[in-house]
Image (cartoon, grey):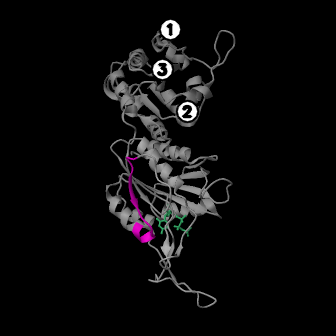
Amino acid sequence: MPLKGKKIILGISGGIAAYKIPLLVRLLKKNGAEVRVMTTPSALDFVTPVTLATLSQNPVATAFIKKEGGMWNNHVEWGNWADLILIAPATANTLSKMANGQADNFLLAVYMSAKCPVYIAPAMDLDMYAHPATLNNLKKLKSYGNKIIPAVNGELASGLTGPGRMEEPENLFEIIQKHFEKGSLSGKKVLVTAGPTYEAIDPVRFIGNHSSGKMGIAIAEEAAKLGADVHLVLGPTSLTPDNPAIKITRVTSAEEMFEAVTKEFPTADITVMSAAVADFTPQKKATHKIKKEGDTLELELTKTKDILYELGRQKKEDQILVGFAMETQNELENALKKLKKKNLDMIVLNSLNEKNAGFKHDTNKVTIIHKEGKIKKYPLKSKREVAEDLFYEILTHYDA
Ligand code: CTP
């Protein structure tokens, strides 16, 4: 039962399709989900709290303040509680308020506090649904990462026929079930790189960096948890992922990483390049240990291939490419430059100036930048949590 124990909030706004939501509550409950229902004030013209409370086995929130005793419904607690929120039916008015950040009822405040995926099933008369204002609001809501369940064709309450009917409750149930079914990356191939690269000077010495691979390994683990088929190209580090399902190609140098990554990339749906690839490699690698003959030793270095740049060049439209940027100055500006130059969908900026973040630490403090310009700064978190945030951003912004 994929829905067992899942916490689902149904938000009902004031449209005639509200009468169908009790059936959805029943379906969800029968399949083991925990359900809370919230309504806008006008939804109560169409459906009663008693019906919804009885079926959901939870009190229904219809306003900020509970009538009896002056207690208040805590929208932040609701926003944190849910694994998924569905707003159905979503009227033109509620859509508009959601798109514009209005929070003048409890449902809207919960929506704005939500930490989970939000699905929206609009329902209204066909002309309202086709109005440019509604279309713009839906576009905006989609760009915020919400999932829109388009209204369907059919008979409308006005007597007209056309698109505007809320998707049937059985289908809404199926969409929710699918969301939780096998993990949201099921059937997808995720390619991750992690760790440093070592560039040999001679058989004993190398040029390397301080990367431990912890961040990339956490990303690979999270992708596997979400059901993806994960391929990890791992530079020299003593760490390995715990999950045996993750396929690993071990490499040492930037050149080897390039070979391994470009081999897997054409079939990858999502690629996250978190490895700290050496930018330069000794031009000549001595076959024998270099003896310390003089007082100085000159090494001539040549540039390695920029793997991510090459992937950005090869990237097809349905592939998602994520890079990392490690900066010490003009951080945002440099990260944005890399995002553009390397044709990325997203870049994760981590700064070496942050305490407990970056190389070797178990924690990291990142800023995620999307190609369309959205910038999200996060507090210091465990690398596992950063990996969760990363996939949350991918799954809510792109059709992965
Ligand atoms: N990268 C890569 N191949 C390289 C160097 C970097 O694929 N030869 C990738 C890294 O894995 C990372 C991104 O490019 O995802 C940015 O790496 P970073 O070292 O921050 O930037 P560089 O492009 O190397 O530029 P600079 O060192 O000048 O900041």
Q: CA distance from mark 2 to mark 3?
A: 15 Å
Whole-number angstrom distance, CA of label 2 to CA of label 1? 25 Å
Earlier in the chain: of badge 3 and badge 1, it is: 3
Residue 166: percent from left, percent from top: 38, 25
Q: Nearer the viewer, residue 159 or 292?
A: 292
Q: Nearer the viewer, mark 2 or mark 3?
A: 3
Residue at 63% over, 14% down: 66
Residue under label 1 = 50
In the image, the residue with mark 3 has its CB under 8 Å from the nearest atom of ligand 1: no
Query: Is residue 172 part of the magenta span, yes or no?
Result: no
Q: Is residue 362 left or right of residue 254?
A: right
Q: In the image, 125: left or right of 384?
A: left
Asked whether the viewer can see residue 277, the reply is: yes
Please tell me how crowded label 3 is: few (under 14), some (14-19), or many (20+) other residues with Cα within 10 Å.
Answer: many
- In this rendered view, identify the residue nearer to me: 360 or 9: 360
Q: Residues within 10 Å of mark 2 (few under 14, many from 20)?
A: many
Tag 2 residue: 114
Determine whether the beta carbon of the residue marked 1 sits less than 8 angstroms from the nearest atom of ligand 1: no
Say the numbered circle drawn on residue 35.
Answer: 3
Q: Is residue 390 above or below residue 284?
A: above
At label 2, which amino acid type do we have?
Ala
At horizontal 69% and vertical 13% (from top left) the residue drawn is: 70
| Image location of residue 288, percent across then percent down | 46, 83
Label 1 sits on what residue type?
Answer: Val
Q: Is residue 91 visible?
A: no
Highlighted range, magenta:
244-256
Residue sitting at x 46%, y 26%:
6
Report if residue 249 lies within the magenta region. Answer: yes
Residue 305, image x, y percentages = 44, 72
Quarter occupied by residue 168? top left
